Image: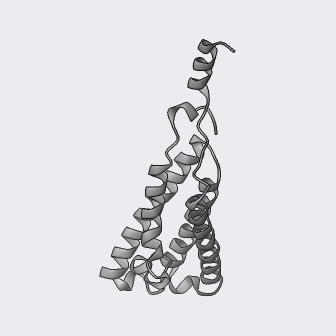
Amino acid sequence: MTGTETEANAGRTPQKDTRNTGPGRLLIAVYAVFALSATARAGYQIATKFAEAPLAHILSAFAAVVYVVATISLAKPGRTWFKVSLAAVLVELLGVLVVGAISLFDPVAFPHDTVWSLFGRGYGFVPLMLPVLGLLWLNKRRPSKANSHSG
């Protein structure tokens, strides 16, 4: 290989996607736990108490879907999965802030808690901290333009 060929190939060599390594694995594991717990909570609420607080239970199911999507997309390499992760984590943050604020200022709107009620107080405020940590991690692991053809 000549020096020119090496330089040309170096520009096309994609950087390794490292979102699912090191601390990223812990982040994915926490998202997986929340995906399981939110899914179980929503399933139980919808099956047993849906009529008592339909909005809260639908939001619990929505949160579960967001956590599942975030878990899967954080674990997958590639620019497309990065974008899906970013969207899921942003939706999660928006959900925590909106549901948290409404449940704080209008508790009648949420007679039953969701995972995002009172900013995740029932879960030690992890639902409030998790998207912030997720966004910081995604920002640190943003795929390069050279990696735009993958995924």
Q: In this figure, which colouring scheme has been used for the structure?
A: one colour
Locate residue 15, reporting x and y percent. 58, 37
In depth, the one of 6 and 54 nearer the eye is 6
Count of numbered circles on the image: 0
Q: Nearer the viewer, residue 105 or 1?
A: 1
Q: Nearer the viewer, residue 48 or 132?
A: 132
Q: Position of residue 6 (x, y in %)?
A: 62, 19
Give the quarter of the figure containing the C terminus: top right
- Residue sticking out furthest to the left: 105
Q: Left of 100 or right of it: where is 80?
A: right
> In which quadrant of the rendered image does the N terminus lie?
top right
Residue 91 x/y as whole percent: 46, 59
**In the image, is residue 52 above or below residue 19?**
below
Q: Viewed as shown, does residue 138 lie left or right of 61?
A: left
Q: Is residue 86 above or below residue 31?
A: above
Residue 57 higher or lower than 69, as above or below: below
Residue 132 locus on image (x, y percent)? 42, 63
Q: Residue at x 48, y 60 (%)?
A: 134
The residue sitting at 50% across, 77% down in the picture is 115
Q: Hey, which residue is sitting farthest right in the picture?
A: 1
Which residue occupies 59% across, 12% down? Answer: 4
In the shown orientation, is residue 20 left or right of residue 115? Answer: right
Q: Quadrant of residue 71?
A: bottom right
Q: Residue at x 51, y 37 (%)?
A: 144
